[in-house]
C-alpha cells in the first residue's frame, strides 16, 4: 500500500491541478484542467477511520470502488488515489495540488502557496473553525507525503467575503472582542458565490465588476450573498457557518437567550446545545423526518405531511427574507442566482422563495422553473422579472483555476 515518492514532470509542461477537499472523515478529490474545468478524474473517500471506509473513483465514465476491509485514514486514501493516478498515467500531468481551506481569517483573502508559516496560520485559525481547519490540515500533510515535490495552494472559503465593509462584519458586541479575538463575521461558501457570480456575469453579457447580484447557495449548508460590482458586500453566514438562514440540520439565526434557557432551565450542557443547533435543527429538527429536501418534498406532496410542509415553508421564508434584506446594500440589481444541490434542483423551493419576492420584481416562468434541473442552467424568470439564474456551482474549477494562476504569477 505504501507508495514510493512519485516522479513528476516539470510543472511548466503539466496541465492539471489535483483539487482536494478534506473533511474530518472524508476526502473529495478531482483532477481538473484549470482552463476548461474538465474533470479528468474525480472521487470521494468517505467514512474514513471507520469499518465502512470506502473510496469511489470516477474516470472516463467508469466508477470503481475500493474497500480495504479495515478502517483507513486520509493518508491511505490518498495513497490509493496516487496508485490509481499512476496506473492511469495521470500523475505526470499534475502540476500542483489545490486545497479547499475553510477559514482564512482576515489574513488570507487570496489563494496562497502553502508554506510552514501558512500551515501554522491555518492551525491557529482552527479556533474559529474547529471542525474544518484541522481536517484541511490533515489533507495538506497527507498530500505532502504523497506528492512531496509538488506545490500546494490553499484556496479559502472565506476569501471572497473579505471585501465586506466593516458595517457588515462587525457584531453588536464589545469591539474589543473583534480586535483582541477576531470575533467578527467572515462568511463561507465564498468560492461557490464567486464562481456563480462570474458565470452570471457571462450570461448577463456584462463584466463581473459591473454586476449587482444576490446569490443563494442552497445545499447541505445554505448561505445568501450580496455582490455589488462584482464584490461580496454582505453574506448570511458569520464567524461560523451556523449564522444566517435555516439549513438542513443547522437552525441559522437564533435568539441567544434560547441557549441560556436551554442550559439554565432545561438541563442542556454546552456540548448538547452545540449538537442541537448544528446537527439536530433546521429542516430535520422541524420535520422530525429528514434534512433532505427530496424526502421532505415527497412527504409533503405524496403524504400531505404537515411537519414536512412546515419545515420547507420556514426554510423558504427565511431565505426569501434574507434575499430581500440585501436590497439595503444595492441601488441596482441585475438578478438572483440559485445554486447548490437544492438551488440547482428543487423547482418547488425556488418557486416558494421567489413568490415572496414580488416587491423586488422577481417572477418565475413556471415551465422554465420546472425544466431547469439536474444540471440544466439558465434564466427561469418570466419576461416581466429581473433575471433568476440557475447555475451549477463548481468550486473545484475555481480552486484549480486560482491555483494555476498563482503558480503562473509566482513563476514570472
Ligand atoms: P453540499 O452542501 O454537501 O455540497 P449539495 O450542494 O450537494 O450539498 O446539496 C445537497 C442537498 O441538495 C441534499 O441534502 C438535498 O436536500 C438537495 N437536493 C439534491 N437534489 C435535489 C432535488 N432533486 N430536489 C430537492 N433537493 C435536492
Image (spheres, grey):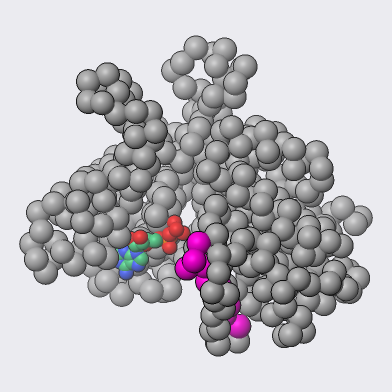
Residue at the location (72% across, 85% down)?
88
x, y percentage for residue 202?
A: 55, 63
Q: Quadrant of residue 91?
A: bottom right
Point out the image quarter for the C terminus.
Answer: bottom right
**Which residue is painted at 63% across and 50% down in the image?**
136
Q: How many marks?
A: 0
Q: Quadrant of residue 109?
A: top right
In which quarter of the view is residue 367 placed? Answer: bottom left
Residue for point 32% across, 39% down: 276
- Locate the N terminus and report the quarter of the image it occupies: bottom right
- Asked if residue 51 lies in the magenta stretch, the reply is yes
Q: Is 94 one of the magenta-colored residues?
A: no
Query: Which is the main secondary structure of the residues drawn in magenta?
Result: strand
Residue closest to the eye, 277 or 177: 277
19 over 233 or under it: above or below: below
Identity of the residue furthest to the front in this view:
70
Tell whether 276 sits left or right of 238: left
Query: Ligand 1 sits in which quadrant?
Result: bottom left
Q: Position of residue 155 (x, y in %)?
A: 67, 50
Q: Nearer the viewer, residue 292 or 362?
A: 292
The stretch in magenta equals 50-59
Answer whether residue 390 is visible to the viewer in this image: yes
Provide residue 338's location: percent of width, then percent of height. 40, 57
Q: Is residue 276 above or below residue 345?
A: above
Q: Is residue 364 visible?
A: no
Q: Residue at x 74, y 43 (%)?
A: 119
Q: Position of residue 398 (x, y in %)?
A: 63, 59
Left or right of residue 31: residue 261: left
Amino acid at each position: 500500500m505504501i507508495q514510493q515518492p512519485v516522479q513528476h514532470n516539470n510543472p511548466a509542461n503539466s496541465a492539471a491541478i489535483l483539487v482536494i477537499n478534506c473533511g474530518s472523515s472524508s476526502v473529495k478529490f478531482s483532477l481538473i484542467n484549470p482552463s476548461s474545468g474538465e474533470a479528468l478524474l474525480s472521487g470521494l473517500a468517505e467514512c474514513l477511520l471507520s469499518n465502512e471506509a470506502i473510496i469511489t473513483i470516477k474516470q472516463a465514465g467508469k466508477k470503481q470502488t475500493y474497500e480495504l476491509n479495515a478502517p483507513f485514514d486520509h493518508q491511505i486514501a490518498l495513497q490509493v488515489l496516487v496508485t490509481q493516478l499512476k496506473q492511469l498515467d495521470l500523475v505526470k500531468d499534475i502540476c500542483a495540488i489545490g486545497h479547499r481551506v475553510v477559514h482564512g481569517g482576515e489574513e488570507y483573502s487570496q489563494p496562497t502557496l502553502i508554506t510552514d508559516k501558512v500551515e501554522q496560520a491555518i492551525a491557529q485559525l482552527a479556533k474559529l473553525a474547529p471542525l474544518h481547519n484541522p481536517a484541511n490540515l490533515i489533507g495538506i500533510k497527507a498530500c505532502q507525503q504523497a506528492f512531496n515535490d509538488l506545490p500546494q495552494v490553499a484556496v479559502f472559503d472565506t476569501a471572497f467575503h473579505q471585501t465586506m465593509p466593516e458595517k457588515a462584519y462587525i457584531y453588536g458586541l464589545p469591539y474589543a472582542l473583534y480586535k483582541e479575538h477576531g470575533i467578527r463575521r467572515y462568511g463561507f461558501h465564498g468560492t461557490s458565490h464567486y464562481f456563480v457570480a462570474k458565470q452570471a456575469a457571462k450570461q448577463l453579457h456584462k463584466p463581473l465588476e459591473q454586476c449587482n447580484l444576490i446569490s443563494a447557495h442552497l445545499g447541505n449548508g445554505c448561505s445568501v450573498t450580496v455582490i455589488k460590482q462584482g464584490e461580496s458586500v454582505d453574506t448570511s453566514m458569520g464567524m461560523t457557518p451556523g449564522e444566517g438562514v435555516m439549513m438542513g440540520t443547522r437552525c441559522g439565526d437564533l435568539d441567544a437567550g434560547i441557549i441560556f434557557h436551554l442550559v439554565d432551565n432545561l438541563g442542556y450542557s454546552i456540548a448538547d446545545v452545540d449538537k442541537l443547533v448544528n446537527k439536530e435543527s433546521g429542516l430535520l429538527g422541524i420535520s422530525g423526518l429528514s434534512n433532505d429536501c427530496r424526502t421532505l418534498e415527497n412527504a409533503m406532496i405524496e403524504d400531505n405531511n404537515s411537519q414536512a410542509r412546515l419545515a420547507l415553508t420556514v426554510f423558504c421564508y427565511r431565505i426569501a427574507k434574507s434575499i430581500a434584506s440585501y436590497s439595503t446594500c444595492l441601488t441596482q440589481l441585475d438578478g438572483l442566482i440559485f445554486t447548490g444541490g437544492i438551488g440547482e434542483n428543487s423547482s418547488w423551493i425556488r418557486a416558494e422563495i421567489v413568490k415572496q419576492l414580488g416587491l423586488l420584481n422577481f417572477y418565475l416562468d413556471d415551465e422554465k422553473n420546472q425544466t431547469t434541473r439536474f444540471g440544466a442552467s439558465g434564466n427561469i424568470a418570466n419576461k416581466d422579472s429581473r433575471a433568476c439564474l440557475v447555475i451549477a456551482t463548481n468550486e473545484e474549477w475555481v480552486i484549480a483555476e486560482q491555483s494555476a494562476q498563482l503558480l503562473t504569477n509566482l513563476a514570472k
